[in-house]
Image (cartoon, rainbow, N blue to C red):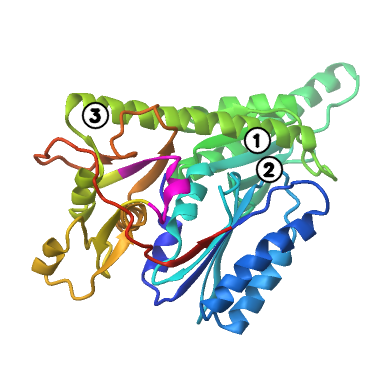
Amino acid sequence: MLVDWIRPLLGRPGPFTSVHLDVSRAGGRHEREIADRWRPLRRILELADTPAELLGMLDDAVAIPIRDDSVGGRLLVATDVDGILVDRPLVTSPPSSRVARGATPDLLPAAVYSDEVVDHVVVTVDRAGADLVRRGWGSSDVAWQASIDGERADVAQPGPGGISESRAVRRTQDAWSRNAQSVASVVDRLVATDGPEIVVLTGDTRAVGLVGRALGSRARALVVEIPGAARGATGAQDVFEARLRGSLESHRVRRRAAVVARLTEGLALGRGALTGLDAVVRASREGRVAELVLETTVQRTVGEGPLVWAGDDWAALSLTPDVLVAQGEPHLREMDAVIAVLRAAIGQDAGVSFVEPGTAPLVDGIGAMLRWDVAEPQPRASTGRGRGRPWATAYV
């Protein structure tokens, strides 16, 4: 999945302050639990010379409760000058809450967030039109919303009345059909221009069928029908929301399986994919990575695993400093290998996907699908050792 929303941050001057907070419920008062988890992290940032004004902004943000029980984590990214730039909910709770302060934002939770998101549009229809809401599951952000109101004069079912009734029925059904066509036209344009992964149709059963049949083939292939919502309904629609979450999670599982299948096939054929830290670092430096693939366990090892050498630019990374010195890179530092390849993936507009350990034939827990092939040596297990941490990063 693309992590393009984080790319603009890479061009901003640091330092960055990143917060990856567990906001799952453990019982008791939720707000008090979050405050207790935040307090030691705040103290760490104080010791790292985070400005008091920024700490106050983070205090205010963390104090805002998240009412959605499906949210387990939260990612905040800020700079001293601009304040909070990113505040995103995460479905998965982090292995441990942590804060980071350094030259780049904490990219791993950003990648986890994008892997969780399913970009979808919910189309709630009745016989007079529809309400459309587009967002990504894993995010409470509404990316786009609109209402479509068609003909209303003839949408009500006429009562009995002989010949006049028959004509009225035809007028009513024609109005339903025209309104469905209007809704379908908007959805078709949205699919063509913005490409959501799923189109969810819900609402009036008759109207759902009319809109579904009026959609073009491209949009129709994305449709999932989920009953339970209604236009203009007041109050929570819990049954629909539960069904929606289940459908989106199923899609995410299928999407991950498709990544595993493509990677496995590419590795078996010896083209279009590679694995192992050495090979991925080289491909990242050359801008050849189309999709970075990481095992989910990297969340527990970041800051403790192998390091690579990195410069200011995302493409400046290598297992040894001599490569970058020869390229004239002026500023070198050691960086956690996972963070370095994530930075490179974001910089070259690559996607990032996570897979469960053992589901794909990965060496070092890392692989990539490529934009193009060059001769690559066989991957070998990394011998890199954690020799310190790239940021002032702390875990609790």
Q: Which residue is mark 3?
A: 266
- How crowded pointer 1 is (Cα within 10 Å; few <14, some 14-19, many 20+) is rated as some
Mark whose residue sits in front, 1 or 2: 2
Q: Residues within 10 Å of mark 2 (few under 14, many from 20)?
A: some
Q: Magenta region: which residues?
A: 291-304
Disc 2 to disc 3, C-alpha distance: 35 Å
Residue matched to label 1: 245
Q: Amino acid at mark 3?
A: Gly
Q: Is residue 14 left or right of residue 222?
A: left
* Whether label 1 touches label 2, CB < 8 Å: yes
Q: Which three-letter amino acid code belongs to the residue tagged 2?
A: Ser
Q: Which residue is mark 2?
A: 70
Please say whether residue 294 is one of the residues in the magenta stretch.
yes
Residue 290 position within the rendered picture, expressed as x and y whole percent measured from the top left:
29, 44
Asked if labels 1 and 3 touch by Cβ distance under 8 angstroms, the answer is no
Residue 258 falls left or right of residue 163: left
**Residue 332 spot, x, y in % from top left:** 23, 70
The answer to whether 185 is drawn above or below residue 57 in the figure is above
Identify the mark at residue 343; answer none if there is no mark.
none
Q: Depth check: give the residue in front, 99 or 164.
A: 99
